Each structure stands twice: as structure tokens, then as C-alpha cells.
Amino acid sequence: MRTLNVIGAGKLGRTLARLWSERGVFRIGSVCNRSLASASEATAFIGAGTAVADISSMAPADCWLVAVADDAIEATAKALASHFQSPPSHQSASDPVVFHCSGALPASALSACSGAALASAHPVHSFADPQRSLEDLQGSVVALEGDATGRELLNDAFNALDCACITLTPEQKVLYHTGSVMACNYLTVLMDLSLQTFAAAGIDESTARKLLAPIVMQTAKNNFDLGPQKALTGPLARGDIRTVARQLEALLALDSEEQGPVPPSLATVYRTLGDAALPLARQAGLDAASVQKLHTLFDEQKP
């Protein structure tokens, strides 16, 4: 069985390591975090591996997962490079594989690790809660990029977790990841802004989340089942210009309060997203005159 070392066993790193260990894909070797205590806590969650204090103390391995923050990947690769200056005697003639899980950066971010096959693997999954991800990762898609040797190994490793893999070029990765951020991370931001708007209406967060859950879940389902064009509903899609104007005025009034319950960005977000939605509304059947009136309304409210 191949050995896997993990650098950065946070939410993603510890989840993948535990699943691969439990499925018999990898034997977990050294685990390195920012502190020995954190590494020890990670190995306890994984149920395998040896916590180490720094990269220089890590044992040789067939595969290395660099699961640190994007901005730290290149520096981590430089710190790791000395491990590949001469191949460990226990390994086969094939190069060891070093991979990261950034959705935005190419495998070449690890280029300091010369002598290793370099790859990247980005699971399209939210690792907010590792315990839940142990059950929910199945069925996710993983975007692979990098050397063929690394991609082949990672394809088999993620298939063993019941994930499907696609292959991207380095040039495709930035826009691919940006699309993921818009759909996932910014959806969370919109939920927070929605809850703040409910709070301004005097509705507590617990109640707001309960009333939002059914419609948000149904909206997501409609988007995947029908596509955004047919899923778009509400006053903008209907061309209810007075309703849109009243909502925007209400947000602007909140913004003008010295101690308002919502941030000044709320009206700007509403106007910007409304304007961005107009081409979709037009495709869905909204008449050109209504589209122009709404565009003028949003444009007039620019700061």
C-alpha cells in the first residue's frame, strides 16, 4: 500500500486522509500542521499517522498532500523540496507524487519539488464540517490537473471514495474555480445578507432560517432541474418595477441610518445583482421596455 504524508491536515486534509485510510487506499505516514498539538489532534481524527513538528521531520512517503492555504503552497513546496533531492531507498523507480487541493492554482505551484510528479486535485465539495464530509463527499466531482502520473494515481484514489474526476488544463483552472466560488461561497454571503435584511424587519435569525430553508432548497433544485432561465422568479422576472423600486428604497433608507442594522453595502448588492439578472430575465420572456426601465432604475441609484 502506498504511503501518504499530509502537510496541512485542516478540514480538507484530515477528511481525505481518514477516508483514504479507512478505504485502504493509502497508509497515512507523517502529519504536519502549524503546531505539534494541532498535528496530534488531526491524527486523532484520522485514526492513523504520526504527528510531527515540522516538514524536515517527516518520513519518506510515496505521496504528499500539501493542503495548506493557497498563498502558502509555493513556500511549503520549497520547504519540502529537500525530500526529493535523492529518491528514498524504499520507493519504486517511479517518482513520488506531490499534489495540492487548490482550485485556483496549477500543479506548477509545487515546482520547487523537482524529482516528484506534480498534480492538483480540487474536490467540488464544502469541507465546512469534516465529520459531515465523511458521509457527504461521496458523489462529488474532483478536478484533476498536472502530470499524467499524478493524475492517474489521484483518479484511482478519488474513485475509491466514490467521486468522479474531470481533467483540466492549467489555463482552465482559474475560471473553473471562480465559477465554484460564485455558486458556493457567494451563496453563503447572500444568505447572510438575506438574514440581515430579515433582522431589519424585526424577524429573528432562527425564524428567518426556518422560513427561508424550503424556498432556498426549492430554488436550488429548480436551478439544477430546469436551468437558471426557467428557475428565475420574483418581481424582477415579472417586471414588477414598483415593487423593485420600493425594495431598493427601503434598503437605501436603512443605509442612511446612522446606526442601521444592516451594512451600507446591502443596497449596492441588491442593485448590482438586479442589474446582472436583467439579461436572464430578458431570456425568460421579460419585455424589452421593462428591462430598460429596471436598468434605468438600478443605474440611477449608483453611488
Image (cartoon, rainbow, N blue to C red):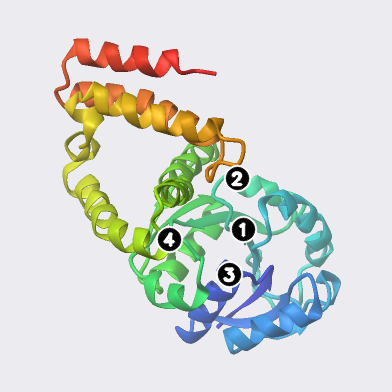
Measured along the vertical axis of the image, is residue 93 above or below residue 290? below
Q: Amino acid at mark 1?
A: His
Q: Which of pointers 3 and 2 lies earlier in the amino acid sequence?
A: 3
Q: CA distance from mark 1 to mark 3?
A: 14 Å
Helix, strand or loop under label 4: helix
Kindly identify which numbered label has been placed on residue 205.
4
Q: Position of residue 204 (x, y in %)?
A: 42, 60
Picture coordinates of residue 21 (x, y %)? 53, 83
**Residue, x 26% and y 28% (percent of image)?**
243
| Residue placed under numbered mark 1 in the picture | 100
Task: Note whether 248 is above or below 122 in the view shown.
Answer: above
Alpha carbons under labels 1 and 2: distance apart: 9 Å
Callout in the foreground (4, 1): 4
> Height in image: 302 above or below 189?
above
Q: Which residue is mark 2?
A: 106
Residue at 60% in and 41% down = 259
- Image quarter for residue 118? bottom right
Q: Residues within 10 Å of mark 3 (few under 14, many from 20)?
A: some
For marks 3 and 2, give the CA distance: 21 Å
Q: Is residue 51 left or right of residue 132?
A: right
Which image quarter is the C terminus in? top right
Q: To which residue does mark 3 refer?
A: 11
Residue contact at pointers 1 and 2, CB within 8 angstroms: no
Q: Closer to the N terminus: mark 4 or mark 3?
A: 3
Looking at marks 4 and 1 on the same chain, the residue that comes earlier in the sequence is marked by: 1
SS state under label 3: helix
User: Amino acid type of disc 2?
Assistant: Pro
Q: Amino acid at mark 4?
A: Glu
Most foreground residue, 61 or 251: 251
Q: Is residue 89 left or right of residue 192?
A: right
Q: Secondary structure at mark 1?
A: strand
